[in-house]
Each structure stands twice: as C-alpha cells, then as structure tokens.
Image (cartoon, rainbow, N blue to C red):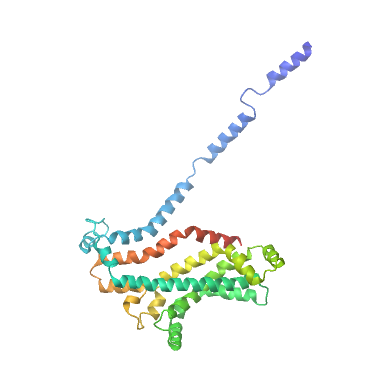
C-alpha cells in the first residue's frame, strides 16, 4: 500500500502543471499565430480602392443632380461648389415641358419593346440550344458568341442603308429590331448555361406524366428560369434606355418630331437649344437618367442571382 501510494504521488507531481495542458498549448499556438500574422494591411487598402472607384463612378452623377439646383451664374462662379441658393426652377421647368414627357414616352416604347423581344426570342433560342441535341448546335452557339465581337459602329452604315431600303428608317421599328439583334448574343450566352443547369430528371419526370416538351417549357422551365430572364431583361432595358448611336442614325434623320425622340437624343437637342442655361441642361440630364438608374438598382439582386446561376451552370 505504501509503495503504491508513493508511485501515485510521484506521477501526480511529475504531471503537467495546472493551466499547461492542452488548453495551455492551444493558447501558446494561438498567441504565436496572432503574433506571426500581425495586422492585415490588405483590408484597408482594398477598402480604399473600393471607395476611390465608387467615388469616380458616383461623383459625376451626384454633380449632375446637384448642379440642376444651381443657377448658371452660380455654376460659372464656382463650378465645384454647392448650390447657393438652392434653385428648384430648373427641375420644375423640365417637368412642366411637354417635350420631356414626349421623350420619356418614346424611350419607354423603345425600351419595353426591345426588352420583350430580347426575352421572348432569347429564351426560345436558348431553350433549343441548351435542351435539344442536333447537328451544328455548338456551331450555332459559337455564332451567337461571335456576335459579341461585332459592335454597332461597324454595322452603322450598312444597317442604315438596309433600313432605308425596307422602309423602316425614321421609325421606332427601325430602332427596336436592330436593338434586339445586337442584344441577343449576350442574352443567349447568359441563358444557355442557366437552362443547361436545370436537371434532366425534371424533363424525364414530366415526360412520364405525359407532358410534351412545349408543356415542360411553359410549366417548369420558364418558372425556374425567372432569375436569368430578369437578368437579361434588365440589361436589355437599361441598354435600350441609354442607347444613343442607333436612334441618332435612324430617328434623328427621319421625319419624327423632336418631341417624339428618345431621351438620349432629347438631352442632346435640349443642351444644344439651351446651351446658355447650364442649370436647366443638368436638370434635364439628371431626370433623363433617373428612371434607368432606379430600375437597375431595384433589380440589382436579381441580376446578380441570374449571373451566378449562369456561371454555376
């Protein structure tokens, strides 16, 4: 009994001191890791770069909006200052102008018609490329991809001559149809991977239940494709709303009155006619870009979700 007690006592004394067991070793390892890592200087640098980029992007927009509340004399005296005093007459004049609302109506017609055409034609073409097996499918998809490298500026002259030949020059259709054509490559590139990511088991189960491919397209595929459709729809809408070159080539040289020109052309015409009234020009410009900006910000999350789905697919 005495020997056993001595051995037990010796083992107890030779054991690790209190606080120096596993917890102590973990604490020493944590201390070494923290000391070795030190302060992460990369995070403040990343935030600084993000703030600079955000300032460069938002600064001009804020300048135009705030400049609309200033008089021309105030702008000439201190271009970078704040309104002193704040003048609301510029915005009231623009909002009370029938020309502005005519330009808004024209831009809405072009934007909504282009968006509808892009979404309808894009989802149908993407469905065929993504879900059907046929010879030349990859070639067709590559052809749409190559459309991204064909800018509007290259096709400006032949497109104008073609529209004159078929009688669409100076009309809204002369802007809507080419706008749809130039937006389809981006639409199909986004939608095809999105549709391919939808499991084939869903289509097989629908076929077992007696659903045709068209029924599968309407009842299952379209609801599941809503994030991608929202993405391409918003991109088409914003692109059409801000489009300038195509309306300039087709509409400004036609017979439509200036009150029925889209907003980008309306801004140019207004700034030319009222070049001496800088505050009114800035107010007109800010009001012209607000609808597209609000529409884009409202659908920002859907755009990101649709793009993420396309990347995963």
The relative height of residue 119 versus residue 70 in the rendered view (above or below) is below
Q: Give 311 or 94, whichever is nearer the viewer.
A: 94
Q: Residue at x 37, y 65 (%)?
A: 289
Image coords of residue 278 (percent x, y): 25, 66
The relative height of residue 36 versus residue 240 in the rendered view (above or below) is above
Quarter of the image that includes the C terminus: bottom right
Q: Which residue is drawn at 28% across and 61% down?
A: 67
Instruction: Tell me which corner region of the image, top left, top right, bottom left or bottom right, holds residue 281.
Output: bottom left
The relative height of residue 4 versus residue 79 in the rendered view (above or below) is above
Image coords of residue 267 (percent x, y): 32, 71
Q: Give 58 or 298, whichever is nearer the viewer.
A: 298
Q: Give 49 or 281, whichever is nearer the viewer.
A: 281
Image coords of residue 6 (percent x, y): 74, 14
Instruction: Tell me which corner region of the image, top left, top right, bottom left or bottom right, holds residue 79.
Output: bottom left
The relative height of residue 258 versus residue 307 in the rendered view (above or below) is below
Left or right: residue 189 compared with residue 157: right
For the image shown, how many numbered marks are present on the structure? 0
Q: Residue at x 60, y 73 (%)?
A: 141
């Amino acid at each position: 009994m005495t020997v056993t007690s001595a051995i037990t006592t010796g083992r107890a004394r030779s054991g690790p001191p209190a606080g120096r067991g596993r917890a102590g070793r973990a604490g020493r390892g944590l201390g070494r890791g923290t000391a070795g890592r030190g302060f992460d200087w990369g995070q403040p640098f990343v935030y600084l770069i993000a703030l600079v980029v955000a300032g460069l992007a938002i600064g001009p927009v804020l300048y135009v909006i705030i400049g609309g509340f200033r008089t021309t004399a105030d702008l000439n005296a201190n271009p970078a200052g704040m309104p002193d005093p704040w003048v609301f007459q510029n915005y009231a004049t623009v909002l009370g102008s029938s020309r502005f609302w005519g330009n808004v109506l024209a831009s809405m017609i072009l934007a909504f018609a282009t968006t509808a055409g892009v979404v309808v034609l894009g989802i149908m073409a993407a469905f065929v490329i993504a879900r059907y097996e046929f010879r030349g499918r990859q070639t067709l998809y590559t052809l749409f991809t190559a459309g991204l490298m064909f800018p509007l500026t290259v096709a400006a002259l032949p497109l104008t001559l073609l529209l004159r030949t078929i009688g669409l020059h100076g009309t809204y259709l002369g802007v809507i149809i080419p706008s749809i054509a130039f937006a389809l490559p981006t639409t199909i590139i986004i939608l095809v991977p999105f549709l391919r990511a939808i499991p084939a088991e869903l289509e097989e189960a629908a076929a077992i239940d007696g659903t045709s491919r068209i029924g599968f397209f309407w009842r299952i595929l379209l609801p599941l494709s809503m994030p991608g459709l929202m993405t391409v729809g918003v991109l088409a809408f914003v692109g059409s709303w801000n489009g300038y070159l195509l309306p300039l080539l087709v509409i400004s040289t036609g017979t439509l009155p200036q009150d029925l020109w889209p907003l980008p052309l309306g801004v140019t015409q207004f700034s030319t006619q009222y070049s001496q009234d800088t505050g009114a020009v800035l107010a007109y410009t800010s009001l012209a870009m607000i609808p597209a900006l609000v529409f884009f910000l409202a659908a920002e999350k859907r755009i990101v979700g649709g793009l993420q789905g396309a990347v995963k697919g």
